[in-house]
Image (spheres, grey):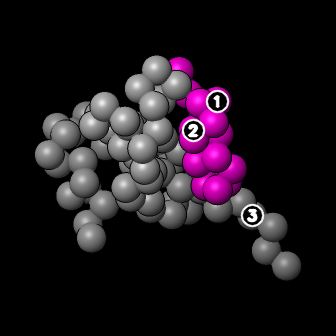
């Protein structure tokens, strides 16, 4: 049985239209936390609107590297980074 945790990098939209990028190993739990205003200070202040994009990564290190890359991009390029 494979017990290795899956890691994800995600992009969500806040109520004010801004984007937030994060990493998690439990996407459902993290989105619930954001929607209950317990996920991050940024999303707490801005309000959670919806999850926009998700990419599964091989491990936490890769997810954090992807998060860093995304955060350096302009708003217009963030959605394109996910490649859909």
Q: Secondary structure at mark 3?
A: loop
Q: Report, in whole angstroms, how far the alpha carbon at label 1 lies from the one at label 2.
A: 6 Å
Q: Which mark is residue 34?
A: 2
Picture coordinates of residue 50, whole percent (x, y): 43, 50
Q: Secondary structure at mark 1?
A: loop
Above or below 25: residue 4: below
Q: Which mark is residue 38?
A: 1
Mark 1, Cα crowd under 10 Å, few <14 / some 14-19 / many 20+, is few
Q: Could you tell me which residue is drawn at 25 percent across and 54 percent down?
A: 79
**Farthest residue, direction right:** 1
Task: Pick whichever of labels 2 and 3 is earlier in the sequence.
Answer: 3
Q: Could you tell me which residue is drawn at 51 percent across and 63 percent down?
A: 56
Mark 3, Cα crowd under 10 Å, few <14 / some 14-19 / many 20+, is few
In this view, the residue in front, 14 or 10, is 14
Picture coordinates of residue 54, whole percent (x, y): 44, 59
Q: Which residue is mark 3?
A: 4
Task: Check if mark 1's residue and mark 2's residue have beta carbons within 8 Å.
Answer: yes
Q: Report, in whole angstroms, how far the alpha carbon at label 3 lies from the one at label 1.
A: 26 Å
In this view, the residue in front, 54 or 34, is 34
Q: Could you tell me which residue is drawn at 55 percent across and 62 percent down?
A: 58
- What segment is highlighted magenta in the picture? 26-41
Q: Could you tell me which residue is drawn at 44 percent across and 53 percent down?
A: 51
In this view, the residue in front, 24 or 60, is 24
Q: Report, in whole angstroms, how far the alpha carbon at label 2 lies from the one at label 3.
A: 24 Å
Above or below 82: residue 35: above
């Amino acid at each position: 049985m494979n017990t290795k945790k899956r890691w994800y990098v995600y992009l969500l939209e806040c109520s004010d239209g801004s984007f937030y990028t994060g990493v998690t190993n439990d996407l459902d739990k993290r989105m619930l936390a954001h929607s209950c205003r317990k996920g991050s200070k940024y999303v707490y202040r801005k309000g959670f609107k919806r999850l926009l994009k998700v990419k599964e990564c091989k491990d936490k290190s890769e997810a954090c590297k992807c998060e860093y890359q995304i955060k350096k991009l302009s708003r217009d390029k963030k959605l394109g980074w996910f490649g859909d």
